[in-house]
Image (tube, rainbow, N blue to C red):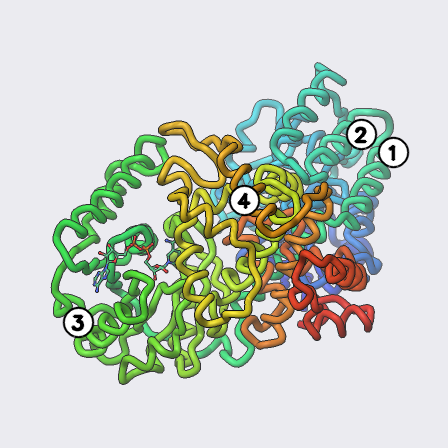
Amino acid sequence: MTAEYKVHGDVAVVTINNPPVNGLGHATRAGITRGLEQAGADASVKAIVITGAGKAFSGGADINEFGKPAAMAEPNLHSVILALEACDKPVVAAVHSIAMGGGLELALGCNYRIAAPGANIALPEVKLGILPGAGGTQRLPRVLGVETALNMIVSGEPVKSEMLAQLPGQKLFDRMAKSPESLLEEAIAFARSVADARPLPKVRDLPCKHPLGDAYFQFARNMVKGMAKNLPAPAKCVDAVEAATQGRFDDGLARERELFASLLISPESRALRHIFFSERAASKIPDVPADTPQREIRSVAVIGAGTMGGGISMNFLNAGIPVTILEMKQEALDRGVATIRKNYEAQVKKGKLKADKYEQRMSLLNTTLDYGALKDADLVIEAVFEEMGVKQKVFEQLDAVMKPGAILASNTSTLDVNKIAAFTKRPQDVIGMHFFSPANVMKLLEVIRGEKTAKDVLATVMTLAKKIKKTAVVSGVCDGFIGNRMIEQYSRQAGFLLDEGALPAQVDRAIERFGFAMGPFRMGDLAGNDIGWAIRKRRAVEHPDMKYSRTADKLCELGRFGQKTGAGWYDYQAGKRDAIPSDVVNKMIEDHRKELGITPRRISDDEIVQRLVYSLVNEGARILEDGIASKASDIDMVYLTGYGFPIHRGGPMLYADQVGLFNVVQAMKRFQKNPRDDQKFWEPAPVLARLAAEGKTFNQTT
Ligand code: NAI
């Protein structure tokens, strides 16, 4: 049952009932029209109320129908709203809890609206790269005024019903109910009171103008241009609302449909919708069912109060979970706690955190030098130096003191979690929790599933990740896991580009124009070039035949570690972060080319972008093949939330799908012919070659 029909005396009540949020899927839409027909045919019914059962009036489109033919199957939402408008008995929307997207558009098609306080009202379509396509851009400005409506449509953010009801001259709500509990009763009484009102009021008949006319829309366009770089939807929202102020209502509606259709097929909207689904999919692990029992996490211990330990601790303090940090020396603890304080104080200063909340969070923090103090913690996260020997000692001590059932996690960014687990007698309780720096800010958490990690440990960590507001993606064990394993190939390509003729500033500019938050060289300077140097030294031993450019090592040999040493790939002025191209570095690169006997060539920005992005794609494909990631969309989530991959492109794997895997493989074959590049590097991963040959996409693999 998706819409219930009940008669209360002379008022019919149609109740949308499609949990969890009364999404307007096909069956629900059909249920609503059936209810309208029934009410229309019953002579004893004088008026109709539409409301929603449970937790929402309606959350809008049914996400299971997104992009599928069912979304447009008749009766589509547009037709349901036309049926509402054509009804010859008054229809009252009784709005509560959530009226968003199509749900709000449905309410706008009714003759009257009565709202309960506390309802969240929004047209959030812009967040998926589209615009309201069932009259929202035409009707909302008529009831709220052009400016308020456009703000809501362009931001997609919800506004409380009582706030909207207070706006002078608003016609969105004819009445506010006293409470959600009394809403239905009040709506029925109100419907009865308007049963004989004729002509029936319709939102489409209301005037729609902005006093500043064209000038206002020019301002609005300028505003959204600054806000929404690379995303076309906000500007098209302005176009649609402008159309509402010009000419006939039905012409505006037609324009809205046209704009909606053009956005729906845009790569940007596809990317945003992909992200929406990928985020949900990431939390689902194929062999760990949703009802897997979980362990309770009431307290957390963190080993190491360095860069990562401090940030990791803040996540739990923010979520109200007590944290004990352990260090080797009191000074290290004091330094770590001072950094946490400094971070919170900066938030208080910016008005992002209330002073009492800050104190409350700090009161949850304890420090210790003694492993014995950790024995009751439910979870311990190790964030000490990245050396297996150090990790071994820590895990042996943890194994000795932690209570049975405690989860033992490592924040290692490259080391073998299976080996770490083997240092304990409880490998089933060991897992990787790979946070990204700064750990209190970055959304990504790679959850590393060891060979022996128990399912309930995995399920518990995934739930905990949500609690601390992280996007968790599960990765198997391999060097660098998903994110860093891919970035290694990207960095190698960046190095080859320098050897062949590009300079750091050109490479960074090209990939930043593509949409990356930061190019590889600016990124290296920020993170510290010495980190990669240490990793390369280790890998040179493990993989002596691996080809890579020596420029990054030469840079480190000059002591140019990045911003922290005031010089890296770029020069930095004291206390500033602006990257200034460096003559020293450019000369170092030139000299290196001479040593190799390379005559530099001009490399186009397109080639730079393709080589960098496809290096991610090819390694991503290998990661899929090796079963390190269970689906391509997980890889996209890692890159979007941890590596600054441009949101509007939806992640490297979706980007490759959109370019077409056949084209990606063709480009790789071209790169293979470049004698300066690495032939083996550009050998398409078998899964990529197969999908390209079959005309398929990565998305179809999952
Ligand atoms: P860090 O050098 O800033 O901090 C390490 C801290 O651990 C130091 O305060 C040190 O005194 C303490 N420590 C060392 N041995 C210890 C022991 N036996 N017992 C207790 N405390 C000990 O290092 P950072 O950057 O915080 O890295 C920590 C871990 O996090 C490493 O495994 C690293 O690979 C990983 N990681 C680092 C990221 C980064 O961007 N810095 C990102 C993701 C992971």
The Cα–Cα distance between marks 4 and 2, rounded to whole angstroms, is 26 Å
Mark 1 or 3: in front is 3
Q: Mark 1 or mark 3, which has the lower sequence index?
A: 1
Q: Is residue 70 visible?
A: no
Residue 144 lies, in percent from the top left, at 64, 29
Residue 636 lies, in percent from the top left, at 60, 59
Residue at the spot of label 4: 120
Q: Is residue 67 left or right of residue 558?
A: right
Mark 4 vs 3: CB contact within 8 A: no
Mark 4 or 2: in front is 2
- Mark linked to residue 375: 3
Residue at the spot of label 2: 243
Q: Is residue 287 left or right of residue 214?
A: left
Residue shown at 37% from the left, 65% from the top: 412
Q: Mark 2 or mark 1, which has the lower sequence index?
A: 2
Mark 3 or 2: in front is 3
For the N terminus, which image quadrant?
bottom right
Residue at the spot of label 1: 251
Q: Mark 4 or mark 3, which has the lower sequence index?
A: 4
Element type where label 2 sits in the image: helix
